[in-house]
Image (cartoon, rainbow, N blue to C red):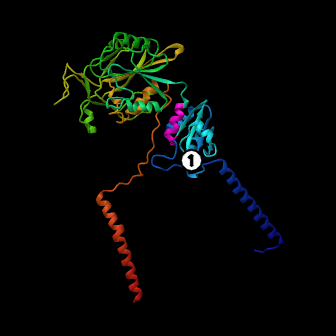
Amino acid sequence: MFVNGKTRRATRIQNTLFLILFLALVGMLAWLSTRYTFTADWTTTGRNTLSTASSELLEQLDDPVSITAFATEDQSIRHAIRDLLARYQRHKRDITLEFINPDLQPARVRELGIRVNGELLIEYQGRQEKLASVSEQSITNALQRLARSGERWLVFLEGHGERRPLGEANHDLGAWGKRLEEKGFKIQSLNLAATPPIPDNTAVLVLAGPQTNLMPGEVALIQQFIEGGGNLLWLGDPGDLHGLQPLADALGVHFVPGIIVDPTTQVLGISDPRLAIASTYPPHPVTRNFDVITLFPQAAGIKHELPAGWQGQAILVSAERSWSETSELSGQIAFDEGRDTLGPLTFGVVMSRARGDAGEQRVVIIGDGDFLSNAYLGNGGNLPLGMNLINWLAHDDRFIDIPVKVAPDRTLSFSPLAQGVIGFGWLILLPLGLAATGAVIWWRRGR
């Protein structure tokens, strides 16, 4: 190729244009990198990104959220907080984060009662809450509590051997009650014989399996509460209604005699015949996106006829092979024609009716109270179902339970034999092999 002054000038111009375009491209990429980010989470359970429940909750928050982190200059603590809250900021842009060194503002720290390095102060709509433990579950639960408009009082009837909402016995509801408190609900026990009537600010009245008869005046107060538009959760048990028959008649409920027996539980390795399971659920806000098996020990079937003005449906139904056993559950158990009631049997119903300007009144009746007890709450989806029931009854059904993300690939377990083989190999065989290899190489070089 012939090179002259003209071709040299063209080459210089081309090189200059290439350098200018290259620098412009690098500058554009740098500018984009400061304004747009791309993240990918390849962990098994997606534990480095927000759960669907957290992101759905953030969509419900209309106003800005202010978060103040009281942390020292320790960058490991600040980085962990900043990294976790960045996941929330990607879904909601008006979440602000401010760091304050507690050593530099001791007066404010004492005023707010800050005790832990890295403690968070979350503010939303003029309400605030402190968090000493920083995790997705704790932050989302705090946002959920702050987002509730007003207090939600859950009133549990007592004085007749009912399950205690914060009790620790196996038949009590303490574990469930603590989870409800974590979600921002206020729990109160009420003895109608001592302090009538039912408070007007009651969000949900809970009847948790009375064991002795209620007095007619107490039943009348409960009926007045229902007639006035109150929301009710009735956790019934097989057997005597203990004076609540007038309430059952008013709600169109008839409890089937006996205990539901479900032979399909044997497939799951469950030998107790008194345990019924629910694996499929009809469409309803309580069971929306709910596909987890729930277990119900000693459940009673329910026949339901909706009273005038009410709407409702069954949400819990036993398997087709089930039946309500009226005989003693011992020895060989079989269906007795004409004595027992053949399944499938409804044992959970929901009811609602319009109350004009007061909104919608809601009632849930379950033929079992054991499924929320301390002994059975951790089985299957019992806890999420219990939370969904209360959220729907309290008109907070847009709030859902936030799951805890775990990493199933973090634990590696070995048997004692495997541990011994690995230890012997690393401590003895491997050093001997290296020494033997060195000796052979030295001998061959020597020859």
Q: Amino acid at mark 1?
A: Asp
Horizontal and vertical percent for residue 424? 32, 67
Q: Nearer the viewer, residue 19 or 103?
A: 103
Place residue 197 in its image quadrant: top left
Q: Where is residue 378, by image quadrant?
A: top left
Among the 4 quarters of the image, the one containing residue 232: top left
Q: Nearer the viewer, residue 416 or 133?
A: 133
The answer to whether residue 394 is seen in the rendering is no
Q: Residue at x 34, y 71 (%)?
A: 429
Q: Which residues are magenta?
A: 132-145
Is residue 78 shown left or right of residue 365?
right
**Residue 316 to residue 44: above or below:** above
Q: Which residue is mark 1?
A: 83
Label 1: state its secondary structure.
helix
Q: Is residue 419 above or below residue 102?
A: below
Q: State yes or no: residue 136 in magenta.
A: yes
Q: Residues within 10 Å of mark 1 (few under 14, many from 20)?
A: few
Q: Nearer the viewer, residue 384 or 116?
A: 116
Residue at 35% of width from left, 74% of height from top? 432
The image position of residue 7, as x and y in percent, is 80, 69
**In percent of the image, x 39 and y 52: which residue is there?**
411
Q: Left or right of 1: which side holds 91? A: left
